[in-house]
């Protein structure tokens, strides 16, 4: 019953993603204003949102692929402004590259590196994200043995595919894996439903909702900051050891 692998969600688990996204959106906007005049300057916030929703609705097959969805939106934005197919496609690629460079420029929670260093000495670590952050482009990258993005797997959490990919990569059983994440549905229910252990990073102190309670699942531990994770892992291991003795 020992834990051998710890997997992490990334955004809002190891870092606050909002500042990086705001910078990325602004960098993308500035590129469009400079290189595709008219694509951004003449469209209202509501019109921009309507265009995004139309793209999402027209391409449900890309729901798990935030990269492809954003590139398609950027292409449609330029086509709507009168740019031709080639310029819109090339412009979408360049605008996305500018966005992604800032999106990857995240600032880890102050305690995160110390926690990862401590855990990496005892467990294999993996990253499982529905977003397009590359953990190997952050300061945390050196501690991770593997990482999967939903767009590479073809399905987003809470679907079992990404969790199963972690099991296939490590060769361990589901009950030997602990997943840590901030989203009660995507991370916690998703991990529990495949038989993994799960610790919920609940920074806001939100209740485990009645909807989640109705599923019969609950996290094996709850923390309010990543600094509390080593203690929560130790407590889980203690419980597993006692359960093993009782058997």
Image (cartoon, grey):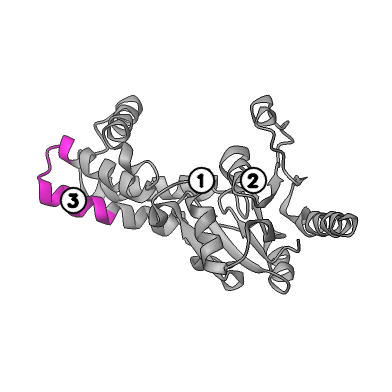
Residue at horizontal 41%, vertical 59%?
A: 101
Q: Earlier in the sequence, mark 3 or mark 2?
A: 3
Q: Is residue 21 above or below residue 50?
A: below
Work out how far the residue at label 3 is from the one at label 2, CA to CA, in angstroms: 41 Å
**Residue span colored magenta:** 79-94
Against 237, residue 34 (above or below) is above
Residue 20 is one of the magenta-drawn residues: no
Q: CA distance from mark 3 to mark 1?
A: 29 Å
Q: Nearer the viewer, mark 3 or mark 1?
A: 1
Q: Which residue is mark 2?
A: 192
- What's the distance in space between the residues labelled 2 and 1, CA to CA? 12 Å
- Badge 3 marks a residue whose secondary structure is helix
Q: Position of residue 224 (x, y in %)?
A: 75, 45
- Reading the image, the residue beneath label 1 is 157
Q: Splitting the image into 4 quarters, where does residue 143 fall?
A: bottom right
Residue 58 image point, x, y percent: 26, 33
Choose top left, top right, bottom left or bottom right for residue 119.
bottom right
Instruction: Point out the frontmost of discs 2 and 1.
Output: 2
Q: Report the side of 214 relative to 91 (left or right).
A: right
Question: Which residue is rendered at x = 57% and y = 54% of the image?
Answer: 10
Question: Badge 1, how many Cα within 10 Å: few under 14, some, many 20+?
Answer: many
Location of the N terminus (image quadrant): bottom right
Between 3 and 138, the one lying in front of the other is 3
Point out which mark residue 101 bears.
none
Instruction: Depth check: give the residue in front, 68 or 46.
Output: 68
Dot 3 alpha-carbon crowd within 10 angstroms: few under 14, some 14 to 19, many 20 or more:
some
The residue that mark 3 highlights is 89
Which structural element holds mark 1? Answer: loop
- The x and y percentages for residue 189 are 62, 41
User: Which percent across, then down, holds residue 74?
Assistant: 26, 44
Disc 2 element = helix
- Cβ atoms under marks 2 and 1 closer than 8 Å: no
């Amino acid at each position: 019953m020992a834990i051998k692998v710890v997997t992490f969600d990334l955004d809002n688990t190891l870092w606050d993603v909002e500042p990086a996204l705001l910078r990325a959106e602004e960098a993308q906007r500035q590129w469009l204003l400079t290189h595709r005049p008219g694509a951004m300057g003449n469209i209202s916030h509501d019109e921009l949102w309507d265009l995004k929703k139309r793209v999402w609705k027209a391409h449900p097959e890309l729901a798990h692929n935030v990269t492809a969805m954003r590139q398609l939106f950027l292409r449609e934005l330029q086509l709507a402004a009168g740019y031709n197919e080639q310029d819109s496609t090339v412009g979408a690629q360049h605008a996305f590259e500018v966005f992604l460079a800032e999106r990857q420029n995240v600032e880890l929670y102050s305690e995160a590196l110390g926690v990862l260093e401590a855990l990496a000495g005892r467990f294999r670590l993996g990253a499982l994200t529905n977003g397009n952050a590359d953990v190997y482009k952050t300061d945390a990258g050196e501690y991770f043995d593997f990482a999967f993005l939903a767009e590479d797997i073809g399905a987003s959490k809470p679907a079992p595919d990404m969790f199963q990919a972690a099991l296939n990569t490590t060769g361990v059983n589901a009950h030997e894996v602990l997943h840590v994440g901030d989203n009660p549905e995507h991370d916690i229910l998703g991990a529990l439903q495949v038989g993994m252990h799960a610790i919920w990073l609940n920074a806001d102190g939100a209740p485990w909702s009645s909807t989640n309670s109705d599923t019969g699942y609950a996290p094996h531990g709850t923390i309010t900051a990543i600094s509390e994770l080593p203690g929560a892992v130790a407590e889980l291991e203690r419980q597993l050891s006692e359960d093993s003795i009782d058997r």
